[in-house]
Structure formats: C-alpha cells, structure tokens
C-alpha cells in the first residue's frame, strides 16, 4: 500500500462532469488499497475570472484582498470533488490550505511555503478517508490567506508530498507528460518516459510549461518522485527522477525548450573598464527586472558592447532605465529588439559528450539561420535567433538530434 499525492489541474476539473471523472479515477486508486491525498486547482479560467473582477474595481487591488478572492477558486473545487467522492460511497473530506495548516510567509500573491503540519491529514487518512486539499493557498503566521503565485497548485502538491513522505507525487494535467519539445511545433515530438530533475528544471525554466518551476525545485530538493500524466488517458506519463538512465540507453539530449517572450537590449560603445557591467545591469536588476542572457564583447578600441535579454513585458521599462544611464556610462548607442526567440538544448548527457554545440550550430547554419547570442551551461546550450525562424530551427534541431519517434533507437 502506497501513499500518493495526486494533483489535478484546472482543465482536469474544468466542469462538474470532469470533476466526476476525476472522482472515478481517485476511487480506482483507492480500491487498490492506496492512501490518497488530492490537491486541486480552481476550475479552468476561474482564477483569471476572479482576477478580472478585482481589476474591474481597481487595477491595483490590495494583494491581501486579492489573495482572499483568488483562493476561493480552489475552495469551490475541493468541495465539489469531495461531494463527488462521497456520492460514490468514498469517504472524503475537503480542507483549505489554512485548515491543513500550510504555513507560508506574508508575501501575498507570491507566498512561499514555510511549513506543513501533517497531523490533521495523517489523522484523516488513518480514518480511511481521501483527503482533498485546496492547492495554491496557505495562511501566514497571523492567519491571513496567502496564495503561492500562478500555477502554484503544483507546488502545494509537491510540498504536501514532501511533508507526508509520499511514495509519489502525481501531477495530472491535460497533456500526456513531458515531451522532447512542444508537440504543437514539432508533430514528431516524443513523450519522455523519464527525465532527471536537473533536466526538468532547465526545461521548465526555459519555457516548457508543463510544471511550475518552483514545484520542480521543491521536488528536487526534497527528493519527491514526481510524475506528470494525463487525467484523460491511461498512460504512465513521465517520471521525473533523481537517477540518470544507465549510460547505454541515455540520450545525450533530452529535450528542446524555447521561448518567444524575451527581448534583447544592446548597449554599445561603453568604456571597457572595471565596474561597467555593474553600472549597466545593476540599475535594471535594482528595478526588480530579471536579466537572463548576458554577453559582453572583447574590446579592440577600449570600448565594449553589452547585450542582455529581459522578459518582453519588461522591455520598455528596461529601455527607459538604460536611456537614463546612457550618458553616464558613455554609451554610443542603445538598441532594443523584441523579435527574438531563445532555443535551448538540454541534456545531462552533454557532460560526457563533445560536439553537441558544433552540431547545433551546423544544423542552424544549414538552414541559414543566424545566431545572435550563444550561452552554455553544464547541461544546456542556448541560442538567441530571429523569432521568424523559431519553428524552423526547433524542427531542424529536433530531427538532427534524433529526438522524434523516428529517431528513437
Ligand atoms: N488556480 C491557480 C492558477 O490558475 C493555481 C493553479 O492552477 O495552479 O494559477
Ligand atoms: Mg497549472
């Protein structure tokens, strides 16, 4: 008998009919003798609807009140699911984050979990009940309702699994699992049966949207076996595990992530002196803007160019900040390009294999795609290219590295 934490996302509980089929699924596990703790999201679209209501009144509502309203989405689903389970003769009880005592810090709308009291849940499980917990929420020291940031139910599920030392945390969603790349872009994308935390973390932070990044970090830190699977199909999905596959089966590249949501800023002709990178990038990060890729050129004439990327949504604000410091840092020119895309190859096999980067560059060259920026880390290589060629680039790389069904060895 195992203990599973099963999380069902917004589309999986998007209607009462779907909630009833989730109940059937839970009962089938229950009938195998397992203990089940369920974490649910709000019904799909609900969190946005609630957000819209608040914004109708005030475009900048108080974060505390926003959390009070946003947390109601999940509260509806826990009750509906418990009703569906009870109707089927399954003893079940719903709990809000505060009732379990999921203790968070006070950072409204992006709170972090500090501690989970597992006593109540263990007590309920011991009575033979299925425990249904509202995802995405907790309460702070003072009892104020907090939420964990968009997509936060994944983190709730992983944190509960860690606190309860569950055998597996299963994230049920509307896709079959984690793919080699986005199947909407590459038809041939293949479902991965397993992937390491490290790789998943890179893929998640590089634009693969299956799991909230924080939940993957959390699972890696507390060594919670995590599985992503479909709530609509019978399929074991993708296991995210601590162990790398044995050397012989291991693919060198696990997946290709990409994002269109960045913009590139180049500050050219600044003096090549100590402190210059800090004087350019410092004011941007001080404004709370996340800087991603950064490159600085070697200088020939005592000046250098610094290029970096930020989220496209922050591009205009960044340009203004750089505009204000431009004369101060003696910049010759500032340019902004919002039509870029970043593509990243990810794989733990890169550690032990040479030639991945050159194969990537050759593949892009063969398609006449110009690379604007290159960055690498131990298990990833990223390039920034013109957004126009994104799909072509991803498809070519996917086939060059034999990632599709056809390339499966
Ligand atoms: N309902 C919240 C959201 O839409 C949390 C979640 O679904 O994970 O972001
Ligand atoms: Mg989600």
Image: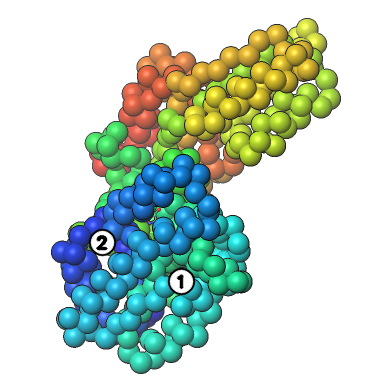
Point 83% across, 20% down: residue: 273
Callout 2 environment at 10 Å: few (<14), some (14 to 19), or many (20+)?
many
- Secondary element under disc 2, as helix, strand or loop, is loop
Residue at left 41%, top 50%?
54
365 vs 152, nearest the viewer: 152
Which residue is found at the position 22% from the left and 66% from the top? 19
In the displayed structure image, the side of residue 133 where residue 173 appears, left or right: left
As measured in the structure, the alpha-carbon distance from the residue carrying label 2 to the one carrying label 1 is: 18 Å
- In the displayed structure image, the side of residue 185 where residue 267 appears, left or right: right
Q: Nearer the viewer, residue 126 or 49?
A: 49
Q: Locate residue 239 relative to residue 330 in the image: left or right.
A: left
Residue 4 can be seen, yes or no? no
Relative vertical location of residue 1 with respect to residue 20 in this rendering, above or below: below
Residue 316 % position (x, y) = 55, 24
> Residue 3 appears in which quarter of the rendering?
bottom left
Q: How many marks?
A: 2
The quadrant of the picture occupied by the C terminus is top left
Please tell me which of labels 2 and 1 falls first in the chain: 2
The percent coordinates of residue 126 (x first, y second) are 39, 91
Residue 221 vertical placement versus 91 (above, below): above
What residue does disc 1 label? 97
Q: Position of residue 59 (x, y in %)?
A: 46, 42
């Amino acid at each position: 008998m195992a203990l599973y934490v099963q999380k069902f996302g917004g589309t999986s509980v998007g209607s009462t009919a779907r909630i009833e089929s989730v109940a059937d699924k839970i009962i089938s596990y229950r009938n195998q003798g397992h203990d089940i703790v369920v974490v649910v999201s709000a019904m799909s679209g609900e969190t946005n609807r609630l957000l819209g209501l608040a914004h109708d009144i005030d475009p900048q509502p108080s974060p505390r009140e926003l959390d009070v309203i946003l947390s109601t989405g999940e509260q509806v689903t826990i009750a509906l699911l418990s009703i569906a389970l009870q109707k089927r003769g399954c003893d079940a009880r719903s709990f809000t984050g505060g009732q379990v005592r999921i203790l968070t810090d006070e950072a409204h709308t992006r709170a972090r979990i500090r501690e989970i009291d597992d006593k109540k849940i263990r007590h309920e499980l011991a009575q033979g009940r299925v425990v249904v917990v509202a995802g995405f929420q907790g309460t702070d020291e003072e009892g104020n309702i907090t939420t964990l940031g968009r997509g936060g139910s994944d983190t709730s599920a992983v944190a509960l699994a860690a606190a309860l030392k569950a055998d597996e945390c299963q994230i049920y969603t509307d896709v079959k699992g984690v793919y080699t790349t986005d199947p909407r872009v590459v038809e041939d994308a293949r479902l991965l049966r397993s992937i390491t935390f490290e790789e998943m973390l890179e893929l998640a932070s590089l634009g693969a949207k299956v799991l909230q990044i924080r939940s993957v970090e959390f699972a890696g830190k507390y060594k919670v076996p995590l599985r992503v699977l479909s709530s609509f199909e019978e399929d074991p999905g993708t296991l995210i595990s601590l162990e790398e596959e044995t050397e012989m089966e291991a693919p060198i590249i696990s997946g290709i992530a990409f994002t269109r949501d960045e913009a590139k800023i180049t500050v050219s002709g600044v003096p090549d002196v100590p402190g210059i990178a800090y004087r350019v990038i410092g004011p941007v990060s001080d404004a709370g803007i996340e800087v991603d890729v950064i490159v600085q050129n070697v200088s020939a004439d005592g000046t250098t160019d610094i290029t970096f990327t930020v989220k496209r949504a922050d591009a205009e604000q960044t340009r203004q900040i750089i505009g204000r410091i431009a004369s101060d840092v003696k910049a010759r020119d500032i340019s902004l390009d919002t039509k870029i895309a970043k593509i990243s190859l990810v794989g733990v096999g890169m550690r032990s294999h040479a030639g991945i980067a050159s194969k990537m560059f050759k593949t892009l060259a063969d398609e006449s795609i110009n690379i604007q920026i290159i960055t690498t880390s131990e298990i990833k290589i990223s390039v920034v290219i013109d957004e126009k060629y994104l799909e072509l680039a991803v498809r070519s790389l996917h086939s060059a590295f034999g990632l599709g069904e056809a390339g499966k060895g």
